[in-house]
Each structure stands twice: as C-alpha cells, then as structure tokens.
Image: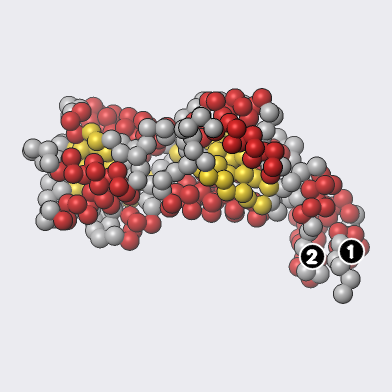
C-alpha cells in the first residue's frame, strides 16, 4: 500500500495541508468541526506522523525532557503519568532523565543532555525545580522549562505546585482535634522545598492551638522508607512516647507503622500515624494511612501542557498555578 502522507490526509479531508498540520500539532485557529473531521481521517487512513520530518519542518524535536532525583519510585511514576498525558495530547515524546543535584556535575550533565537530545524543553521536578543555579543556566541558554512543586517565586517561568504548607497544617490540626498534643514529626529531604513547607505547616498548627513546639519530637528523614525506619526508632524511644506521628511522606509513615507493630503497639489505639502524598502504599497497607492527597499527576500534566503551548508560541497567560492538597482520613488515626 502507498504510504499515507499529510498531503493524503489533506486531500481526503478536503482541507489544506496547513490545516492538517495545525490539527496534528494541536494548534488554535481550527474550528471544532474541522478538527474532528481531520482526526477522523487520521483514524480512517491509519495515519502516523513521521516524527523526524515533522521535527525538521518545524525546527523542533517534539521531545520534552523530565529531570528527577527522588527516592520515591511512586512519586516518579505519578510524575511520568501526568507528563505523558500532556505529551500524548500534543504528539510529543517524553524523555525521563535521572541525575543528581549534588556532586558538582549537574550543569555539565544537563548541557550534555541538551546537546545530544535536542530537547524542545525541560520539566523540572523536585529538587531541580528549586535549583537557582540550574534555572539561571537554562535562562542563559534560552531553554524553555517548567517547574513542578517549586517554592521559588518567579513570574517569568511556568510553575505548578500544591499548597504543601496548608496541607501539613490541616493534617496536624486533624491530629490535634482528635485530642493529640504530643505529636512527633519526620522531616523530608533537605534539598526539597516541600520539606520546609510541610514542617512550617506542622509548626503553624501547633502554634494555632497553643501547643508548645518541642524540637526533640522532630526527626530528620529524606523521604525514603529506610530513613523513616531510622526516624521511627528514635521517636518510639522517646519518653513519654508521642501519641501521634506525622511523617512528611507516606513511605516514611509506613516505616513508622511497621516498627510500631513490631513493638506490639496497636495503631491507632496506642499511637496514631499520618503521612503525606496519598501514594499507593497509603491505601494498600493496614491500617490505611491518613494522609494528604497531593495532586502530583495534575501538577505535572498542567506544567507540561503549559510548556508545550509556550514552545509553540502561544500566550499561556498566568505562569504560576497553585493546586489544593486534600486531607484524606483513614484508619491509622484516632483519639489517643
């Protein structure tokens, strides 16, 4: 069979080649009826665009890169899911690129990535979304980028985040309203802005309810399950033992729950445990974890969609977006 081309689609649909191109690239200035007609022809003719020819014609690679350095595989899976949804909608490909923030080779690593991969843009996840050095480098190189879950205030670049501070306040307040006052807290990775935001929300809730902050109840974690286990050992050895523990993510909270159970403590009768993120583990363990649902997929989807529109020359409007986090109560928390 003869190869189906963009010209074939245009002839079959009765529209111009330019209109087909606009539909293919999800551009504006195409009526809904015309767009639907062209999409129907794509399907009928089983048309698959040639990514190389498409890229050469528009001087783009149609590839978005996603940087990550996060110990939580669940988080990256959710980031990837949101990014892919936006990429598929706009006929883009996604390149997932793991690298380390620390070590001094970050800029060289990214420069090599940009040179070898011809990326149209980058989506930065924590902790890269808060790296001033990286952001300044991308600006100097005129690289399009979008930030996910960043605390940096920059009206010149795309940023989509959730209100982590408010979420941490609400989950701590939930524990307080249950009757807890001796509440331990496990911090996250020091390079992530979410760590300080969640810690700030925890402190604000204590202050709001006139509960004195006790630094002895704060443990240092890094968002990994193992760091949660180490923190749990220290917390459960405190005398008197805290009646509740709020961990900065669900994996650390799950580690606390496991150790508490191993020490023959009943959850939540003897100790309440809460997490953050609403990762799959929060629903799959027993008792289910009370947590904060952070809209990771939606944050990434919106960030990538705005980035692709910006690359295409569209006016994306408001660059800074904050999505709301939501408290989800489950069986791991109760009255002391």
User: Residue placed farthest to the bottom in the image?
Assistant: 1
Query: Residue drawn at (87%, 50%), measured in percent from left and top?
Result: 18
**Label 2 environment density (alpha carbons within 10 Å; few <14, some 14–19, many ≥20):** some
**Side of 49 relative to 69 (left or right):** right
- Foreground residue, 23 or 130? 130
As displayed, is residue 333 above or below residue 319? below
Q: Is residue 33 visible?
A: no
Q: Do the residues labelled 2 and 1 touch (CB within 8 Å)?
A: yes
Tag of residue 47: 2
Tag of residue 8: 1
**Side of 168 relative to 297 (left or right):** left
Residue 302 horizontal/vertical position (percent): 57, 44
Determine the image quadrant of residue 137. Answer: top right
Q: Is residue 279 visible?
A: yes
Residue 110 horizontal/vertical position (percent): 60, 36
- Foreground residue, 37 or 6? 6
Q: Which type of secondary structure does the marked residue at label 2 adopt?
A: loop
- Measure the C-alpha gap from mark 2 to mark 1: 9 Å
Indicate which disc, 2 or 1, sits on the residue closer to the N terminus. Answer: 1
User: What colour scheme governs how the chains and residues are painted in the rendered image of this protein?
Assistant: secondary structure
**Side of 333 relative to 304 (left or right):** left
For the N terminus, the quadrant is bottom right
Residue 170 horizontal/vertical position (percent): 31, 39
Q: Which type of secondary structure does the marked residue at label 1 adopt?
A: helix
Q: How many labels does the image show?
A: 2
């Amino acid at each position: 069979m003869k190869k189906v081309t963009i010209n074939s689609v245009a002839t079959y649909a009765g529209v111009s080649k330019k209109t087909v191109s606009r539909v293919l690239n999800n551009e504006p200035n195409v009526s809904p009826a015309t767009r639907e007609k062209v999409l129907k022809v794509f399907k009928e003719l089983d048309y698959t665009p040639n990514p190389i020819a498409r890229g050469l014609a528009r001087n783009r690679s149609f590839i978005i890169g996603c940087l990550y350095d996060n110990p939580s595989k669940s988080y990256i899976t959710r980031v990837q899911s949101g990014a892919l949804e936006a990429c598929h909608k706009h006929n883009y490909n996604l390149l997932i690129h793991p690298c380390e923030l620390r070590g001094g080779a970050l800029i060289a690593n990214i420069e090599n990535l940009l040179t070898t991969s011809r990326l149209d843009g980058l989506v930065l996840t924590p902790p890269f979304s808060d790296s001033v050095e990286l952001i300044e480098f991308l600006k100097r190189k005129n690289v399009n980028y979008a930030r996910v879950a960043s605390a940096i205030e920059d009206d010149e670049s795309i940023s989509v985040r959730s209100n982590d501070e408010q979420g941490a306040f609400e989950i701590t307040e939930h524990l307080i309203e249950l009757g807890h006052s001796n509440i331990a807290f496990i911090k996250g990775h020091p390079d992530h802005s979410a760590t300080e935001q969640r810690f700030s929300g925890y402190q604000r809730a204590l202050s709001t309810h006139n509960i004195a902050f006790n630094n002895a109840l704060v443990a240092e974690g890094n968002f990994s399950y193992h760091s949660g286990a180490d923190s749990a050992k220290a917390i459960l050895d405190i005398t008197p033992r805290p009646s509740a523990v709020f961990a900065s993510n669900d994996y650390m909270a799950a580690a606390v729950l496991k150790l508490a159970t191993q020490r023959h403590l009943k959850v939540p009768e003897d100790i309440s445990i809460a997490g953050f993120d609403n990762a799959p583990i929060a629903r799959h363990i027993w008792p289910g974890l009370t947590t904060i649902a952070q809209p990771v997929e939606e944050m990434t989807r919106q960030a990538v969609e705005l980035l692709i529109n910006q690359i295409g020359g569209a006016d994306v409007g408001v660059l800074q977006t904050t999505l709301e986090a939501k408290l989800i109560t489950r069986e791991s928390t109760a009255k002391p």
